[in-house]
Image: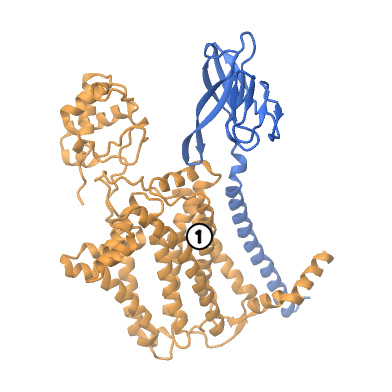
Chain colours: A blue, B orange
């Protein structure tokens, strides 16, 4: 048989657990909601954009420098970024498009048609016409940009 | 489990944190305070919600006139639970103000401002003032119609002070008028200074509460005490749960701030304060002339505040029983009833915001059924032709093309007709396609656009 004293202790115990449980519930709820909000960027992936760089007939065996205006949605801030690409379209082959940004420190490389090489004006890096490093400091080949021809027009995939 | 207890033990020996928490939770309070003393805890919990949601919004908010509105709209549309967080932060203010108001009335009725708790009463008043300042500064941050006009009118009130008024206005706006400089000022106050001050005052409020304990209710003759935990803690939790659940429900039901983007050309917008400033707003409406303006805008609210601050010295008797201080209680309840009454009156008599359609006023004024029908069909044509895809009217529609709010005032009818039929004749590069529709619909459209200037009666 329970004495009134014991009953009181049981009651206090139950109340403690219940009240702490409610506090824990609200805290967890707040943490979950705040967590979902904070981790929102993890669930937003930048969508690949496909942009035309013009008809194939514009391009020849030599690389041409293309300046592309890429619309960027940086959150609420919308702007246009200028992207420099080198593109060529040898007849019968797939178009070849490279980013003109040197993989060393980001200068814009120049195509030298005489030596058929890309040269970086900053620190002297040299790349082959396939984008591979020939000499100098660049740690990696020029970045190849996926491109395909549809109805005689070249589209580049930007990620 | 054993290692966990070891860690706790290790910590305890070095910090005494468990012992400290126990002292806090086992503090003995009068058994009779009960539910009356749970409102302060509710206000505290709501403040925590504001701090958390405020931090979350600060991850995205930009205090720039051209970006503020967009940065917050972007949160609502693109961030997970963004709309909910905005709504919670927006409605949280109202909930805190209600909780603090009722808490203050409770403290007043139970005579808890009397010796030796005078200083804590003052700290509580300061807390209330800081919360109102936070509400006022926060309102401007989305840079929408409501926030802009609230800041403008609020600062104008401050500037009605004789001699130093102009100085006050420049100090608060940071320049000549409410704009970019005001926005960063309010931002800094809202995000850094006021929350810091609030935190400091809360710590002070709680330590003073602990120093003197809750006041023993006058009707408690037994004088029993009990530890704060678990019974009073459980009551606090129930009260907090009710408050938070209501806040969540309101936030989910009514969403966030609805005020449209700031548009100074829109003369149909009716500047109205948030409901918690309505009682003061109503008083301002009844005044005439410069002298009364100064009294209503500046002297009256400050007098009320000073009277509240002086309360512990005005009502000095030792008894906290209501029946032994009838005079003070009657005056106090009269003030409370006036504030509640004026607020209710302001809410009931609030005019409909023109919002989506300023032409409503024409509709009412027209009186003539045929005109009313013409207007309605013009509005229909406007939508049928997809005009809102590019044009905004009083906050609704896109902003690719010019905002058409009040266009009836700006453009002559003749020009408007020619423009609608052939925009390229005026501006060669105009993107807008010529309006192609029946003559009847075209007339209705012109009539509708021409009506977009009527300022509803104030």
Image mark 1: chain: B
Residue A18: percent from left, percent from top? 66, 65
Quarter of the image containing the N terminus of chain B? Answer: bottom right
- What secondary structure is found at the residue carrying circle 1? helix
**A1 above or below B220?**
above
Q: Residue at x 32, y 84 (%)?
A: B327
Most foreground residue, B410 or B88:
B410
In the image, residue B257 lies at what x, y percent?
41, 50
In the orientation shown, which residue stands out farthest toward the right? Answer: B2
Picture quadrant of residue B123: bottom left
**Residue nearer the viewer, A61 or A67:** A61
Q: Nearer the viewer, residue B38 or B196?
A: B196
Q: Residue at x 25, y 68 (%)?
A: B165
Residue pointed to by mark 1: B50
For disc 1, the neighbor class at 10 Å (few under 14, some 14 to 19, many from 20) is many
Instruction: Give the image quarter of residue B186.
Output: bottom left
Point out residue B370 in the picture as x, y percentages from the top left corner. 17, 30
- Kindly indicate the quadrant of the structure image that contains residue B345: bottom left
Residue furthest bottom in the image: B318
Which residue: 56% across, 88% down? B222
Q: Is residue B327 visible?
A: yes
Reply above or below: B25 against B372. below
Q: Between B214 and B321, which is closer to the camera in this rendering?
A: B214
Residue B218 against residue B257 in the figure, above or below:
below
Residue beneath the point at 46% across and 45% down: B71
Q: Is residue B308 left or right of residue B354?
A: right
Q: Position of residue B292 (x, y in %)?
A: 19, 69
């Amino acid at each position: 048989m329970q004495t009134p004293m014991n009953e009181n202790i049981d009651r206090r115990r139950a109340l403690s657990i219940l009240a702490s449980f409610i506090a824990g519930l609200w805290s967890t709820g707040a943490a979950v909601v705040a967590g979902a909000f904070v981790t929102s960027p993890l669930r937003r992936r930048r969508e690949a954009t496909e942009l035309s760089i013009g008809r194939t007939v514009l391009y020849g065996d030599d690389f041409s420098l293309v300046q592309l205006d890429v619309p960027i949605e940086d959150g609420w801030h919308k702007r246009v970024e200028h992207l420099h690409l080198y593109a060529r379209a040898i007849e019968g082959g797939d178009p070849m498009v490279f980013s003109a940004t040197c993989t060393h420190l980001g200068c814009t490389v120049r195509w030298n048609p005489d030596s058929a090489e890309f040269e970086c004006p900053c620190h002297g890096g040299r790349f082959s016409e396939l984008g591979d490093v020939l000499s100098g400091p660049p740690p990696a080949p020029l970045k190849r940009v996926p491109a395909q021809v549809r109805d005689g027009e070249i589209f580049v995939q930007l990620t | 489990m054993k290692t966990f207890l070891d860690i706790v033990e290790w910590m305890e020996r070095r910090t005494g944190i468990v012992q400290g928490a126990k002292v806090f939770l086992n503090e003995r309070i009068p058994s009779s305070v009960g539910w009356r003393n749970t409102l302060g805890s509710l206000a505290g919990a709501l403040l925590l919600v504001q701090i958390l949601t405020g931090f979350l919004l600060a991850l995205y908010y930009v205090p720039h006139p051209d970006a503020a509105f967009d940065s917050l709209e972007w949160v609502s549309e693109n961030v997970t639970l963004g709309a909910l967080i905005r709504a919670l932060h927006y409605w949280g203010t109202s909930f805190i103000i209600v909780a603090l108001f009722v808490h203050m009335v409770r403290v007043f009725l139970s005579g808890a401002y009397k010796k030796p708790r005078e200083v804590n009463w003052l700290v509580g008043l300061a807390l209330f003032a800081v919360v109102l300042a936070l509400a006022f500064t926060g309102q401007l941050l989305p840079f929408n119609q409501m926030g802009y006009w609230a800041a403008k009118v609020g600062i104008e009130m401050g500037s009605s002070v004789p001699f130093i008024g102009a100085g006050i206005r420049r100090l608060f706006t940071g320049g000549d008028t409410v704009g970019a400089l005001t926005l960063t000022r309010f931002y800094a106050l809202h995000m850094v200074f006021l929350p810091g001050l609030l935190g400091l005052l809360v710590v002070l409020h709680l330590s003073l509460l602990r120093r003197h304990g809750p006041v023993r209710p006058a009707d408690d003759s037994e004088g029993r005490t009990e530890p704060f935990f678990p019974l009073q803690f459980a009551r606090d939790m129930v009260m907090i749960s009710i408050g938070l659940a209501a806040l969540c429900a309101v936030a989910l039901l009514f969403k966030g701030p609805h005020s449209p983007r700031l548009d100074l050309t829109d003369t149909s917008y009716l500047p109205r304060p948030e409901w918690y400033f309505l009682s003061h707003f109503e008083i301002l409406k009844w005044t005439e002339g410069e002298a009364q303006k100064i009294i209503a805008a500046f002297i009256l609210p400050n007098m009320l505040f000073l009277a509240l601050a002086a309360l512990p010295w005005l009502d000095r008797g030792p008894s906290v029983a209501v029946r032994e201080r009838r005079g003070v209680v009657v005056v106090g309840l009269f003030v409370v009833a006036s504030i509640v009454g004026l607020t209710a009156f302001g809410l009931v008599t609030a005019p409909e915001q023109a919002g989506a359609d300023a032409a409503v006023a024409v509709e009412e004024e027209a009186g003539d059924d045929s005109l009313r029908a013409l207007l309605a069909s013009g509005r229909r044509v406007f939508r049928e032709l997809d005009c809102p895809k590019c044009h905004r009217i009083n906050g609704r529609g896109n902003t690719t093309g010019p905002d058409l709010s009040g266009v009836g005032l700006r453009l002559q009818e003749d020009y408007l007709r020619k423009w609608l039929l052939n925009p390229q004749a005026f501006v060669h590069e105009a993107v807008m396609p010529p309006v192609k529709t029946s003559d009847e619909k075209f007339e209705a459209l012109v009539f509708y656009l021409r009506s977009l200037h009527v300022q509803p009666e104030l």
